[in-house]
Amino acid sequence: TIGFSFLIAIILGPILNNIIGLSGIFWLTAVLGVIAIGVLIKFVPTPKVLLVHPVNETVKGQIVKVLLMPELMRLNFGILVLHASLTALFIAVPIILQDYMGIGESAQWVVYLPVLLISFCLMIPFIIIAETKNRMKKVFVSAIFVLMLMQFLLFGFDKHIVVMSVLLVLFFASFTLLESSLPSLVSKLCPIRRKGTAMGIFSSFQFLGIFIGGALGGVIFHHFGVKGVFIFNGVLT
């Protein structure tokens, strides 16, 4: 659902921007937040007795220990890089579509929709192979390699719409595979009584990656253009 919410946002964002403008999108976000609070109050059950359960919740005393676990450090860094590269990429791609290819903001969903649907379908068989054939490591590393390779290829083919679309399909297939595999690996690798803390830290690194990708991606684009963003992503990955 997290992945799908992002995909829907990419498609609807440009269309909504054309209808209600950037300020309208912020107002819409505020309204959706209020609705979410209503759903929380009305439909999410409140337990009669509130207990801190280490399997489900973050425990303060465990945070440092969980942060320093080598296996989890790698996965936390992985989700940070994954979302940083994604956010930085979407500083560059809309500009390429508009400035190089003449596809206006309101029409860019025509590119995004097939790219995202094809990439999602492409990812599913590899997830099944990784989980059922016990080949998670090979599939996981291969997805990282493809993610990196696509950045450097986008550097060379950023003015060819068909080639760029194919590269974006491969990027999103790899991204979606890693996006779904990383939380699964965190829950499998961390001790059972530290699972809540581990998932809380993992989520924090995920959103920190979005911040870093947006901030550094913007600075790099300002100084080095879209090609600089692709190099940044490739090196980061």
Image (tube, helix red, strand yellow):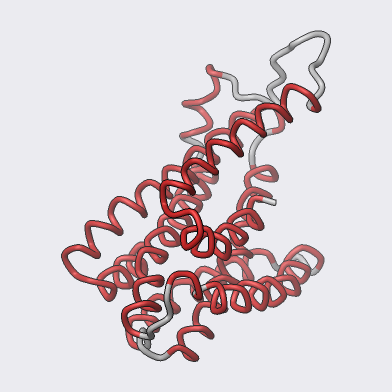
Q: Residue at x 57, y 57 (%)?
A: 9
Looking at the image, which residue sits at the far top? 49
Query: 88 or 39, which lies in front?
Result: 39
Compared across the picture, whether 124 is left or right of 236 comes to right
Q: Quadrant of the C terminus?
A: bottom left
Indicate the position of residue 208 as horizontal and vertical percent values.
42, 43
Residue 165 location in percent, x, y? 51, 83
Q: Which residue is at a point 60% across and 24% down the rendered structure image?
A: 58
> How far from the left and from the top, in percent, is residue 19?
51, 59
- Is residue 82 found left or right of 152 in the rendered image? right
> Could you say where residue 47 lies in the image, as x and y percent from the top left?
81, 15
Is residue 132 placed above or below 46 in the rendered structure?
below
Q: Residue at x 82, y 22 (%)?
A: 45
The one nearer the camera, 184 or 204, is: 204
Count the marks: how many?
A: 0
* Residue farthest along the left direction in this orientation: 223
Please identify the quarter of the rendering in which residue 43 is found. top right
Q: Residue at x 64, y 48 (%)?
A: 183
Height in image: 158 above or below 217? below
Q: Residue furthest front?
A: 19
